Image (tube, rainbow, N blue to C red):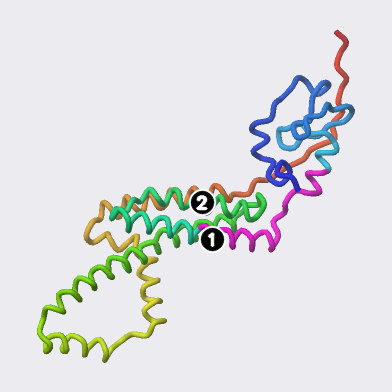
Amino acid sequence: MTDSFANPTPQFGTAEYVGTPGGDHCQFCHQPIAGNYYRANDAIACPACAEKMRGELAKDTHAAYVRAILFGVGAAILGMILYATFAIVTGIVIGYAALAVGWIIGKAMIKGSNGVGGRRYQITAVLLTYAAVSTAAIPVWIHFSGEHKHSQHQDATNADDSESGQGEQPAAASRPSMLSALGTLLLLGLASPFLEFPSNPLGALIGLVILFVGMRFAWRMTAAKPLEVFGPFENSPQPPR
């Protein structure tokens, strides 16, 4: 399936209209139209291209949705890594990265579905965008927590043996399970966009607004792009000059 038929909408915006229907060309194969013609939305199409679009245009199937989810999850993981890496390397958390994350996820899902969009694609894209941006806080926390523990360890080596022993016993007595710790960390990550409100309400609000815009990007990019083919219409001959 060629790209022009799998995702015809962009070509409608760039189609070159040449004269009247009598001397027109197909907006897809660019061949002269002799006889009847069709209209694919606002673009003129020859009978062969119209038939091909009707037969080969990607449809919203279960397989297309599964591919879109797989591509979207991959893009969400990539977006989360890029977001967290920037924050760790620079020490700066920039909410505007959420816009890029939303765009990457929307683009990936449309690529995976071969141009198919719709409400379930939009909802999935929004959820993945929120999850990617919010959970980016987890690797950032782990990184800075590791640095903090390393600093504490250096301080502990300078303390006497009795104080060091007293600090180890409670940790050995009540060590949480790995699964419970991961679950708690995941929940905290998903709630991270709201955790800043008590200390910095204005900054948290701005971050949420930017996150909403990023989710809006993903929503719009995965919207359904319907194609309607009308015709056939009679192609009147050009008047003699």
Stretch in magenta: 52-75
State the residue at coordinates (78%, 30%). 30
Residue 7 at what x, y percent from top left?
Answer: 68, 44
189 or 144: which is nearer to us? 144
Amino acid at pointer 1: Gly
Q: Which mark is residue 74?
A: 1
Measured as percent of width and height from the top left, residue 211 is found at 40, 52
Task: Place residue 138 in its image quadrant.
Answer: bottom left
Answer whether residue 184 is magenta in the image. Answer: no
Q: Position of residue 91 (x, y in %)?
A: 28, 55
- Amino acid type of the residue tagged 2 in the rendering: Ile
**Magenta highlight on residue 65:** yes
Determine whether, in the image, residue 13 is placed left or right of residue 215.
right
* Front residue (pair 202, 160): 160
Task: Give neighbour class at mark 1: few <14, some 14-19, many 20+ (Cα, 10 Å).
Answer: some
Quarter holding residue 131: bottom left
Residue 239: image tag: none
Check disc 2 and report the residue beneath it. Answer: 104
Q: Position of residue 135 (x, y in %)?
A: 40, 64
Q: Residue at x 26, y 51 (%)?
A: 202
Answer with left or right where residue 47 lies relative to residue 63: right
Q: Main secondary structure of the magenta part?
A: helix
Query: Which sits in the foreground, 206 or 56?
Result: 56
The residue sitting at 39% across, 76% down in the picture is 182
Q: Which structural element holds mark 2?
A: helix
Label 1, secondary structure: give it.
helix
Q: With 154 as the anchor, is 21 left or right in this view?
A: right
Q: Residue at x 56, y 55 (%)?
A: 122
